[in-house]
Image (tube, grey):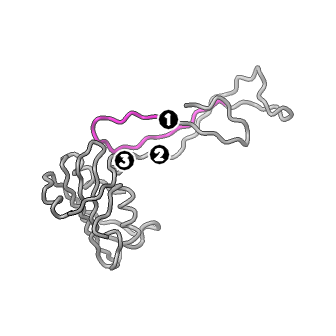
Amino acid sequence: MPIEILKPEAKGSVYVSLVRPESFSICSFVNTLSYTTKEIDPDTKEPADDDEGFPDEYQIEELSVQPGDFITPAFVGNFTHTWDELENESTAVYNLPKTENSNDLQSLVDKLIKNLSMMPIESTEVVTSQAHHVLKLYGKSIKGDKVASIIRLASNSKGFMMKNQVKSSNEEISAMVANYIE
């Protein structure tokens, strides 16, 4: 929904609605704010009636669609039993550098929980050792598919080693969650 008029020093909101595809797709959108700039009369603070203005554009931040956008956190009473029942498995291994936002295991665990939008199980969201950690996550896709992840983390001088092992009732979700890292 566009804004008809936005006066100087005023704030406004623009709303955009996207249609979700049937498949699970990870992508990024470039967002461009398009507008018409007009000269404003300093006395009336209004544009002149005969001023058609000139079109202009401003690129704003990208919008990323990630696996967590297709998953809702869910609780499971017996993670091991559920894990054993799920058929479709995908695994990926990463070497992650330390960054300003992820400089210890706890900050990395917090980021993974947020980005994957899955519920930590068995209190694994709490890191008790800065050398290594195992994070167990569970959720359901927007279509109702079960998805479970066991993420093994180890810290070294350069960053972190991560093994993401994912099982799901949907093969596409297993691969998407295992192979995504931000």
Which numbered disc flags the more N-terminal residue, 1 or 2? 1
How many numbered circles does the render carry? Answer: 3
Q: Residue at x 73, y 43 (%)?
A: 9
CA distance separating discs 1 and 2: 14 Å
Q: Amino acid at mark 1?
A: Val
Q: Earlier in the sequence, mark 2 or mark 3?
A: 2
**What is the secondary structure assignment of the residue under circle 3?**
helix
Disc nearest the viewer among 1 and 2? 1
Give the percent coordinates (x, y) of residue 12: 64, 39
Q: Position of residue 23 (x, y in %)?
A: 27, 38
In the image shown, does 99 or 77 lie closer to the viewer?
77
Mark 2 element type: strand
Region rendered in magenta: 16-36
Say few, some or many: other residues with alpha carbon within 10 Å of mark 1 (under 14 / 14 to 19 / 20 or more). few
Q: Which residue is mark 2?
A: 62
Q: Which residue is mark 1?
A: 16
**Which of disc 3 and disc 1 is earlier in sequence?**
1
In the picture, residue 114 is in which quadrant? bottom left
Q: Contact (CB < 8 A) between labels 2 and 3?
A: no
Q: CB of mark 1 within 8 Å of CB of mark 2? A: no
Q: Taking 62 as reference, is 94 left or right?
A: left
Distance (Cα) linking label 1 and label 3: 16 Å
**Residue at 32% in and 35% down:** 21
Q: Amino acid at mark 3?
A: Asp
Amino acid, disc 2: Glu
Residue situated furthest top in the rendering: 50
**Is residue 26 on the magenta stretch?**
yes
Q: Point out residue 171 in the picture as x, y percentages from the top left corner.
A: 18, 47
Quarter the N terminus occupies: top right
Residue where numbered disc 3 is placed: 69
The residue at 59%/35% (across/down) is 57
